[in-house]
Image (cartoon, rainbow, N blue to C red):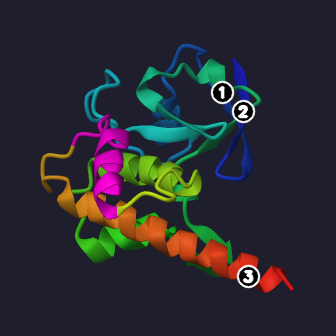
Amino acid sequence: MKIEMNVNGAARVVEASPYRRLLDVLREDLRLTGTKEGCGEGECGACTVSLDGETVNSCLVAVAQCHGRTVKTVEGLAAQQGDKEILHAVQTALVRCGGAQCGICTPGIAMCAADIVERELLHDQDLQQARVMVRELLAGNICRCTGYQLIVDAVIEAASEVGLQRRERASRRTP
């Protein structure tokens, strides 16, 4: 079956069995190997991608479900500015805070964290509430290396940075 989808901002067409997992098509056919397979059962979150703006476990999605839809992988988080790639605030914060260890869970966590930041889910939360909320929102992502605190710190840092940038842009537009 011919599957047409937008992947990381580019129109892509793949010939695949409609029952193949999105995870396998991304990794094997499209060579987007940032998305990792952890458990293959939707329990660990390592394969998290965005499908039409919603985070999903790509190991549980049949590729036929993606026909005509938009998929974003961890490779699509960074923005292009001319010939330079600018990492998403979450990616930068994960590196700066030490929230990335072996790398198996990191892409899925980055995708979920970017969703948290972009939806401004931590807006108007005090630090303690934000920590609890981040832990709850990342509960579907299993990490065996970090103990989560560094990941939580990174998400809060990225949310603060993006929120500040949005407020600065808004104040420049307001006369």
Point out the stretch of residues depicted in magenta. Answer: 127-142
Total marks drawn? 3
Q: Write down the residue under mark 3.
A: 171
Work out how far the residue at label 3 is from the one at label 2, CA to CA, in angstroms.
Answer: 35 Å
Q: Does residue 82 show up magenta in the picture?
A: no
Work out how far the residue at label 1 is from the one at label 2, CA to CA, in angstroms.
Answer: 5 Å
Amino acid type, callout 2: Arg
Amino acid type, callout 1: Cys
- Secondary structure at numbered mark 3: helix
**Residue 100 visible in the picture:** no
Q: Between 36 and 25, which is closer to the camera in this rendering?
A: 36
The x and y percentages for residue 144 are 13, 46
The x and y percentages for residue 83 are 66, 81
Residue 18 higher or lower than 86, as above or below? above
Q: In which quarter of the image is the N terminus?
A: top right
Q: Earlier in the sequence, mark 1 or mark 3?
A: 1
